[in-house]
Image: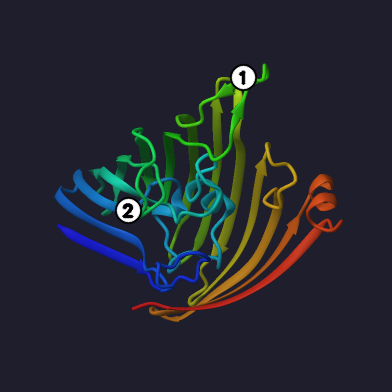
Amino acid sequence: GSVRVQIEAFNGIAGSTNGNGQKNIQVMDAFFTYKFNPAFQVRVGQFYTPVGYENYDISPATLETVDFSNICYRMACRNAIGYDFVDYGRDLGIMLMGDLLPSAEGFNYLSYNFAVTNGQLPCKDDNNKSKDIIAALTVRPLKYFNVKAAYNYGEYQTNKDLENEEGEEIPGKYCPMHRFVGGFWYNNPTGLDVRAEYGYLRGKKEGISLAHETGFYALAGYHFGKFLPVVRYDMYHDSLNKLSLNNYDRVLLGCTWEPFGNLKVQLNYMLSMYGKDVREASNNGKSTSSQLQLMGLFKF
């Protein structure tokens, strides 16, 4: 078996202090994994959920860009009904997982994950008796290529009052929501790196729409020795919050330099493009915004 513990110390999040005004330590990962054999493993504790590549198969140490896509931030790492901020894509529960059908080249043709979790913010008591169901399947027909699909269903307590078209009050404690993320990834460590994912998030109770969001991104790069230049297109649309700045089309140009295995330096330029409604209501009339990011990451 193995144990993993990761904390976020003195995180600086507003309000995250105890009664003495001291900063709280946020537990990110705290789980135990027991490997009966490659085909059957059990994980128990607070762990990152297998929704999408970026939340499960990729870490900040291996991501080709400084920031994750909006599918990861808004879909895998956020509950659109229960709360509206990043929860780091973690949850408390139990997960079964494994790798099946080993190939002669040393990779497995099939991997699976099935988890039952609280469906609540990490390090916070569950506010209802409903549990989340998460299922993911990865198929690898070739050594460097795989296709992945993940589905998450849960019922959550909404943070706003509900009222139907007839003006009747609707209880907001068990509101169903579906999340799906699917895509493909080809990654040759000495050549081409191409990945794309599509995701949707839907929540509705008794005809009242509570969440309706869609996202997509496509990334392409090429490993030139210690350098990895990349380009990424990222789109996200929230049909219920049409004036949100999260509704954008974004193009990223960047490059990662890894002089040695423990250090990487990344430079990214991002151009975000907004529709008419967003730019008039939320972006001071501007149709675009630009951002330049420079990050160094040392791992040990």
The image shows residue 300 at horizontal and vertical percentages of 33, 78
Which disc is residue 168 wearing? Answer: 1
The image shows residue 141 at horizontal and vertical percentages of 38, 43
Q: Quadrant of the N terminus?
A: bottom left
Amino acid carrying label 1: it is: Glu
For marks 1 and 2, the one nearer the N-term is 2
Is any atom of residue 144 visible in this view? no
Q: Is residue 155 left or right of residue 251?
A: left
Q: Residue furthest bottom?
A: 259
> Exactly how many numbered labels are in the figure?
2
* Nearer to us in this view, 106 or 57: 57
From this view, report whether residue 53 is shown above or below residue 80. Answer: below
The residue drawn where x is 19% and y is 48% is: 38
Q: Residue furthest front?
A: 19
Amino acid carrying label 2: it is: Phe
From this view, report whether residue 282 is shown above or below residue 61. Answer: above
The image shows residue 94 at horizontal and vertical percentages of 25, 44
User: Helix, strand or loop at disc 2?
Assistant: strand
Is any atom of residue 191 visible in this view? yes
Residues at badges 1 and 2 in contact (C-beta under 8 Å)? no
Residue at mark 2: 47
The image quadrant of residue 123 is: bottom left
User: Helix, strand or loop at disc 1?
Assistant: loop
The residue drawn where x is 56% and y is 42% is: 198
* Nearer to us in this view, 141 or 39: 39
